[in-house]
Amino acid sequence: MKIFRTLTIATTLTIAPMVDAADWTDYLPTPDGVIMARYEQLLIDDTPSRFQVRYARLGLYGKIIPKIDYRVQADFCDEGKFKMLDAWARYAPVQNVKVKIGQFRAPFGCDVFRGPGVQVFSNRSFVARDVVNQRAVGASVLLSATGLPLTIEAGVFNPNSISDHTPYSTSKVAACKATYSVGDFSFTSSFKSYVPQQVRINTANCSATLRMGRWMAEAEYTYKHFCGSDFKDSHAYNFMSQYLMPVKWGVFNYFSMEGRYDGHSFDSSGACDGNGLIVGDLPARSRLTVGSTVSYRMKNLRCDFRLNYENYFYRHGYEPLEGRDDKIVAEMVIKF
């Protein structure tokens, strides 16, 4: 037995250098992560403030073979709570076709797909946070075309929360998204249909993004219709721009200035009362955000120091919830 082990080890050590390193190193999982720590100062009476770890995400991406890859990502401190974000496997049976199954973001919206490591502002737009934001458990198919800058992804998902995968359901969330890029422009168009409780909600979204030199500008609009309900259709919008320039300020190599105006009309998450009527739980509001960011960027590594001022506008004398009022946010974000 000892002789057999010795021969096995010797053979392995002899053959290993002969194997092309790319044959196995290409399939080692790649780790990544984001840490976002901040200080917030509310601009109201008594000027309350807080420190917060907004995100502490860690993830792995890898391949089994060239046609099969996977992704796992968790947030260990989403405002102090643990959340499992992504856990999916994907297979490319033929060229330009990818099939994904597991837990991931539904193909709907534009700004919502900017992770915290590449966000333009401290807080996501109302469209991305409250209107189109949905991770779900399900499956999707991504189609692309050789020589044509167009991708289409469509999927079906469980209607229940990602924190509980056990319930069976008679209806599913259906979502699809098309993305087209030409020159400095990119366009997206999305549609989603789902029944959160008793009323079906159909939602449409479109966006246009311009990247030209140091400038980036984007407009996004979402329309939501509550089928068979007297609840008024809602509208959400996000207009933003950024000017980014290279600098040589110590270790920092980029500086940017940002501006945004976003908001939505009176809206509902889809919750119903005891009579099956839609409950309006998202007040009509808008917000003006201005800020600046100084950054260090090198390949996949990034560190941002960001300062934002947010001015909120509410209608009908609504009293905002704590933290949803005028504020200053100073934060540090590290992406690796």
Image: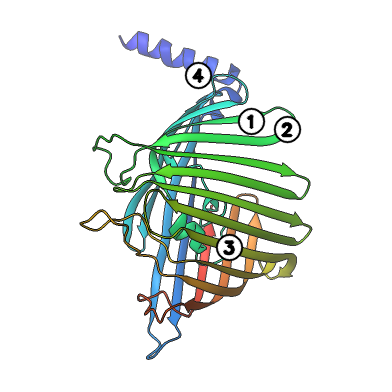
Tell me the CA gap for discs 1 and 3. 27 Å
**Residue 148's disc number:** 2
Q: Earlier in the sequence, mark 1 or mark 4?
A: 4
Tell me the CA gap for discs 1 and 4. 43 Å
166 over 129 or under it: above or below: above
Amino acid, disc 2: Leu
304 over 326 or under it: above or below: above
Where residue 56 sits in the image (x, y, percent)?
42, 57
**Which is more foreground, mark 1 or mark 4?**
1
Where residue 206 sits in the image (x, y, percent)?
60, 50
**Which is more foreground, mark 1 or mark 3?**
3
Image quadrant holding the N terminus, namely: top left
**Residue 144's disc number:** 1
Residue depicted at x 48% and y 55%: 34
Determine contact: label 2, label 1, CB under 8 Å: yes
What crowding class fits label 2: few (fewer than 14 Cα within 10 Å), some (14-19), or many (20 or more)?
Answer: few
Amino acid, disc 4: Leu
Q: Which residue is mark 3?
A: 238
Q: Nearer the viewer, residue 298 or 312?
A: 312
**Residue 13's disc number:** 4
Amino acid, disc 3: Asn
Q: How does the figure colour the protein chain or chains?
A: rainbow
Tell me the CA gap for discs 4 and 3. 59 Å
What crowding class fits label 3: few (fewer than 14 Cα within 10 Å), some (14-19), or many (20 or more)?
Answer: many
Tell me the CA gap for discs 2 and 1. 8 Å
